[in-house]
């Protein structure tokens, strides 16, 4: 591939980072998927939120704060914009007043991305948006998942039978054959339960739950090793709910739970996934109205960059050059 195909953020000598149209990581906005290896996508929707809404505003604020992102991962040395053709492809269509219609619109958008052979990296949106993404990336076979979250998101239903909420996506994904639960690891799980059996589905289906207590007991290197063991060699998706972080680092989210991991621990864990067969990722539940400082959106943008580095490395490995 010719280096000229690989877009870079604008030269700082001609365009300082606070200037210009605020695309993800100051990259070009591109609608021709044939020009891309990795697409950065916003899903501005929070209609699956059961309590405090606001994540529909996530993509715009993450784009804004992502102007702070630079080119090279200081810890791993990875330069994703050199390895892969990356661009912002905009936001998916959504319907803010209809859940099922939105799931279809979001799925249709990702279906086009995946069929073009492009790896999606997304900014939510609430966590229900991961379900239509999985319907696209796992259309042919179930995938594994490394899932960072305070919550398992495997409840059956809310409000007397509503099946599609941000507390239910991974139960639906298992039922629909999108996730191989034996290749799913959930890291950071905590918070009081509604019912003593709230985690039964995840455990009974074979998901590996690493509670925040076990996270601290094991230590970060052992947690990374366990995540890699569970995910194995098969195609694996990364989903990062910012409420997995302690709310001191990410207060701008709808369902904060104290006692979470730090931003640095999150960065270390994502870097530890390098080498897995990663086929997509997302950062969800950034709700800017709860954090006027903008820090949660900066956290979201930076975690997207960390995931992007691991994805670009995976794309490069599959390419075999
Ligand atoms: Mn979640
Ligand atoms: Mn959560």
Image (cartoon, rainbow, N blue to C red):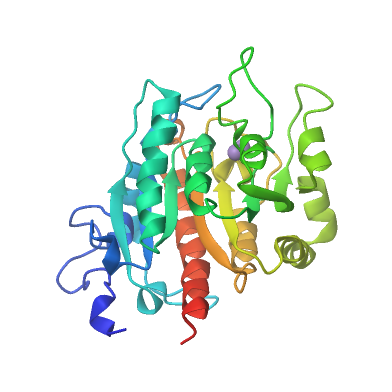
In the picture as drawn, the residue positioned furthest to the front comes out as: 140
Q: Residue furthest bottom?
A: 321
Q: Position of residue 289 (x, y in %)?
A: 41, 31
Q: Position of residue 225 (x, y in %)?
A: 76, 67
Q: Nearer the viewer, residue 68 or 286?
A: 286
Q: Is residue 16 above or below residue 98?
A: below
Farthest residue in the top direction?
A: 160
| Placement of 73 over or under 66, stated as above or below | below
Residue 77: in sight, yes or no?
A: no
Residue at 54% from the left image edge and 77% from the top image edge: 76
Q: Quadrant of the N terminus?
A: bottom left
Residue 154 drawn at (x, y percent): 68, 34
> Image quarter for residue 50?
top right
Q: Give left or right: position of 295 versus 233.
A: left
Q: Is residue 9 above or below residue 76?
A: above
User: Residue at coordinates 63% horizontally, 19% vertically from top-left?
Assistant: 158
User: Where in the figure is residue 227, as x and y percent of width and height?
Assistant: 73, 61
State how many labels appear: 0
> Could you tell me which residue is drawn at 19 percent across and 57 percent down?
19
**262 with respect to 2 (left or right):** right
Q: Is residue 72 visible?
A: yes
Please identify the quarter of the rendering in which residue 32 is found. Answer: bottom left
Front-most of residues 60 and 39: 39
46 vs 164, nearest the viewer: 164
Q: Quadrant of ligand 2?
A: top right
- Point out the residue furthest to the left here: 14
Q: Is residue 257 left or right of residue 289?
A: right
């Amino acid at each position: 591939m010719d280096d000229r195909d690989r877009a870079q953020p604008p030269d700082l000598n001609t365009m300082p980072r606070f200037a210009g149209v605020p695309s993800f990581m100051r990259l070009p906005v591109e609608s021709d998927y044939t020009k891309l290896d990795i697409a950065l996508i916003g899903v501005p929707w929070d209609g699956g939120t059961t309590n405090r809404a606001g994540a529909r505003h996530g993509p715009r604020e993450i784009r804004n704060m992502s102007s702070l992102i630079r080119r090279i991962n200081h810890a791993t040395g990875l330069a994703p914009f050199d390895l892969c053709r990356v661009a912002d492809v905009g936001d998916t269509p959504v319907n803010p007043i209809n859940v099922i219609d939105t799931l279809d619109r979001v799925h249709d958008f990702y279906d086009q991305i995946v069929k073009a052979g492009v790896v999606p990296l997304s900014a939510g949106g609430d966590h229900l948006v991961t379900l239509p993404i999985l319907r696209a990336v796992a259309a042919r076979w179930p995938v594994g998942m490394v899932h960072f979250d305070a919550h398992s998101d495997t409840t059956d239903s809310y409000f007397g039978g509503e099946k599609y909420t941000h507390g239910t996506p991974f139960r639906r994904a298992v039922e629909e054959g999108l996730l191989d639960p034996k290749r799913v690891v959930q890291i950071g799980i905590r918070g009081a339960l509604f019912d003593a059996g709230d985690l039964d589905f995840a455990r009974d289906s074979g998901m590996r739950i690493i509670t925040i207590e076990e996270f601290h007991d094991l230590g970060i290197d052992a947690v990374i090793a366990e995540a890699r063991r569970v995910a194995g060699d098969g195609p694996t998706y990364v989903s990062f709910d910012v409420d997995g972080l302690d709310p001191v680092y990410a207060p701008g989210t709808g369902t904060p739970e104290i006692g979470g991991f730090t931003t640095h621990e999150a960065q270390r864990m994502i870097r530890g996934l390098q080498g897995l067969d990663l086929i997509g990722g997302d950062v969800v539940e950034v709700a800017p109205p709860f954090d006027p400082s903008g820090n949660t959106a900066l956290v979201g943008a930076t975690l997207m960059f960390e995931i992007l580095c691991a994805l670009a490395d995976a794309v490069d490995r599959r390419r075999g050059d």
